[in-house]
Amino acid sequence: MLPNKEGQKVPSVTFRTRQNNEWVDVTTDELFAGKTVAVFSLPGAFTPTCSSSHLPGYNELAPVFKENGVDSIICMSVNDTFVMNEWAKDQEADNVILIPDGNGEFSEGMGMLVDKADLGFGKRSWRYSMLVKDGVIEKMFIEPEVPGDPFEISDAETMLKYINPNAKKPPLVSLFSKVGCPFCAKAKEMLQEKGLEYEEIVLGKDVTTKSLQAVSGKTSTPQVFIDGKAIGGSEELAAYLGT
């Protein structure tokens, strides 16, 4: 059975990282001392669940974690620093610190180093998350020990609910735009003024006009969606935001 280490200190490890083309040693003291840190560990960078759900979830909710007393969010994986750095770029995970546990020392110290030789992975970390305060583990969410790669309780929303059940998550905003569209620029300006982060989907680059018509029934831009609801163009957005 994988150990639950609540109430214990995190392992003392020095991580070899690559920053600005230079080797930089990062210690657990630097990462955890005097801080409240949310940590999630996963089997590997660029793997399906890790890339589609685990890392994006924490990256997107990072501002809410900060509002609720979390100083930083760390993603831990038994990968080298070059792989972790490229994964961070690919995922645009600017709100999460990706730490390469290249030798598996931290994962082993946590009792979470497992054998995934059947997948050709060798030794990797089991998937889990934890809340660490000043180097001491307050809470752990360890995925059930079942075959495969379970992802049920180490997600960002479960951790946020533990920290504050009433935490308010930011709305999910998507904006279909077109290069050179002045109404699109106005819509983005309104969203920025309200402090709303948004995903921009550019016609001709990310999707076709047919795709826009399929989801909105319209071909004009912008088309804004908030939490799955079609808001419309810039005028409709202005009315929705009360601007």
Image (cartoon, rainbow, N blue to C red):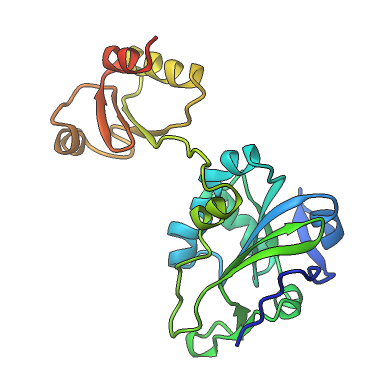
Q: Nearer the viewer, residue 194 or 8?
A: 8
Q: Position of residue 177 (x, y in %)?
A: 32, 26
- Residue 117's place in the image compared with 101, above or below, is below
Task: Look at the image and tell me in which quarter the N terminus lies.
Answer: bottom right
Q: Is residue 101 left or right of residue 146?
A: right
Q: Position of residue 7 (x, y in %)?
A: 76, 69
- Residue 206's place in the image compared with 84, above or below, is above
Q: Residue at x 76, y 77 (%)?
A: 105
Q: Nearer the viewer, residue 72 or 19?
A: 72
Residue 27 seen anywhere in this rendered image of the structure: no
Q: Residue at x 32, y 39 (%)?
A: 206
Q: Position of residue 56 (x, y in %)?
A: 49, 52
Which residue lies most toward the top here? 243
Residue 81 placement: quadrant: bottom right
- Residue 218's place in the image compared with 13, above or below, is above
Q: Position of residue 90 (x, y in %)?
A: 52, 52
Q: Residue at x 71, y 70 (%)?
A: 6
Residue 217 seen anywhere in this rendered image of the structure: yes
Q: Is residue 30 left or right of residue 6?
A: right
Please tell me how many numbered marks the rendered image carries.
0
Task: Look at the image and tell me in which quarter the C terminus lies.
Answer: top left
